[in-house]
Amino acid sequence: PVDERTSQPSRRLHGGASFALAETVGGIGSALLVDLEKYEVRGAQMSGNHLRSVREGWVFAEAKLLHRGRNTHIWNIDILDMQGKMVSTYRLTNFIISK
């Protein structure tokens, strides 16, 4: 939700909230692809671009796996508003580490 918990003082969606949503979605995506009894998923690198602001409503994350290697996963995550317009876009690299 875009509300007082996720907004800047100017009542716009906080970039950090979007960043956290994107990293969470990409991390869960990698966790669903590995045996968590044998491997851990750790974020290695993330970058993002904010394209437009959102003042109210909800935002949604769409993740696309770009690379599924033995030791790394690379994700592209887009944050969209309720009209399907892109709010921000991120690239996340996760390490896949043996326990």
Image: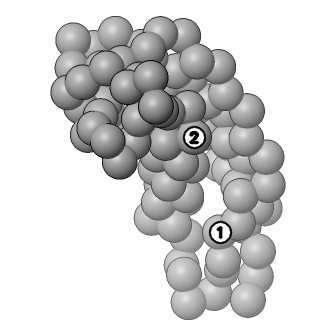
User: How many residues crowd around disc 1 within 10 Å: few (fewer than 14), some, or many (20 or more)?
Assistant: many
Q: Quadrant of the C terminus?
A: bottom right
Rendered view: 97 above or below 55: below
In the image, taking residue 25 as reference, residue 95 lies left or right, namely right
What is the number of the mark on residue 41? 1
Closer to viewer: mark 2 or mark 1: 2
State the SS at label 2: helix
The residue type indicated by label 2 comes to: Gly
- Residue beneath the point at 21% across and 12% down: 83
**Coordinates of residue 9 in the picture (x, y in percent):** 46, 31
The residue type indicated by label 1 comes to: Val
Q: Nearer the viewer, residue 42 or 73?
A: 42
Rendered view: 99 above or below 61: below
In the image, taking residue 29 as reference, residue 60 lies left or right, namely left
In the image, taking residue 50 as reference, residue 79 lies left or right, namely left
Q: Earlier in the sequence, mark 2 or mark 1?
A: 2
